[in-house]
Amino acid sequence: MITVRTVDYHTAGEPFRIADTAGAGMPPAPGDTVAERCATAIGPGGSGTAPRRGALDDVRRLLVQEPRGHAGMYGGFVVPPDDGAHFGVLFWHKDGWSTACGHGTMALGAWAVDTGRVAAPDDGDVPVRIDVPSGRVTATVHRAGGRTTGVTFRNVPARVSARKVPVATSLGLAEADLAYAGACYASVRAGDLGLDVTRAALPALVRAGQEIRAALAAHPATWHPGGPLLSGVYGVILHEELPDTPFGPHQRNVTVFADGQVDRSPCGSGTSARLVLLAEDGRLGPGEDLLHESVAGTVFTGRLLEGGVTEVTGTAHRTGEHTFVVDPHDGLGAGFLL
């Protein structure tokens, strides 16, 4: 009987399932750094979306696939840090692994404080330092009255990679802006494809996102100097303008990643990518905030600091604690995806 214990959170509606590799029965994550551990989990000749099915990937599939998970599940394995952080994490989704995850970082900050892994006051802020495959990030947990009221995610520096890259889709020609924010994101105005960012339009938005990601797969602007682990388009952000707030721009987006997976939150790392693009366009000035809304109606607030450093604030809440088992007589084993 295989047993895996997890703690589940959601950040602005997007799930995040946490499993600590230090737990009983969990396979090791070999490597000297978190980036090396991620590469080991993917396996020789693999990629983030085509992993080798090793021991840790078997657990990923168990936790993300039905009947224990679902096609929209997201999560992370807590692993040892590089040096000086509270812990490291390997992010995963239904199709493999990722190098960055803002909503997951926020959930991990809340989890670290909730479980006492990182001591926190009843009132005030506490930084939780986390090593991820793209570098070191911080989740500053905000506390009041003995509870967590919000989390601010500080990302690795973001930068613009390319502007107005033509992309052919079944809905017509679009222009994509590429930005790196721990992973490469392609931003496209939904209206350029005759779409709006609504739940009713989700099937068309997902198809467009998949087409754009495939069309940009070999574009040189998606290559990262750090190598293949950080290269390639991770997510496609289809966005639309909403009326500005007194504090800055207001946008709604849907981020499509992996093989058509939809981020229910406004996408933490994707918000970082939007911030550097808006700043280059002159839409986001010093002291201004982006109010970033998801297709589910949840919001993040983002701001750009110096040197491409971004901060994104949202809320994360625990949804459950689970003990998953695999009965050796269960013919479905680790499960399936529809």
Image (cartoon, rainbow, N blue to C red):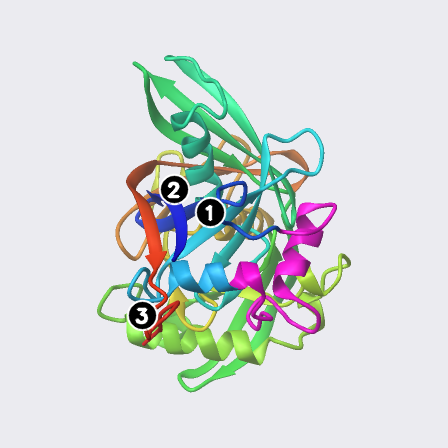
Residue 255 in sight in this render: no
Query: Relative to 85, is 330 on the left or the right?
Result: left
**Disc 2 residue type?**
Phe
**Mark positioned earlier in the residue sequence (1 or 3):** 1
> Is 84 positioned to the left or the right of 72 in the image?
right
For the residue pair 21 and 123, the one nearer the viewer reads as 21
- Alpha carbon distance from label 1 to label 3: 37 Å
Residue beneath disc 2: 300
Residue drawn 41% across the image and 62% down it: 62
Q: Earlier in the sequence, mark 1 or mark 2?
A: 1
Identity of the residue drawn at 74% across and 46% down: 32
Check if mark 1's residue and mark 3's residue have beta carbons within 8 Å.
no
Q: Is residue 263 left or right of residue 307?
A: left
Residue at disc 1, secondary structure: helix
Taking 122 as reference, is 88 above or below it? below
> x, y percentage for residue 158?
63, 47
Residue under label 1, please give it.
268
In the picture as drawn, the residue positioned furthest to the bottom comes out as: 170
- Spot the residue most to the left: 200
Task: Give me the C-alpha separation between circle 3 and circle 2.
Answer: 41 Å
State the image quarter where residue 307 is shown. Answer: top right
Q: Amino acid at mark 1?
A: Gly
Of marks 3 and 2, the one in the foreground: 3
Task: Name the amino acid type tagged 3.
Answer: Asp
User: As displayed, is residue 99 above or below residue 257?
Assistant: above
Label located before the other in sequence (3 or 2): 2
- Looking at the image, which residue is at 48% across and 43% down? 24
- Residue behind mark 3: 330
What is the magenta range?
A: 29-57
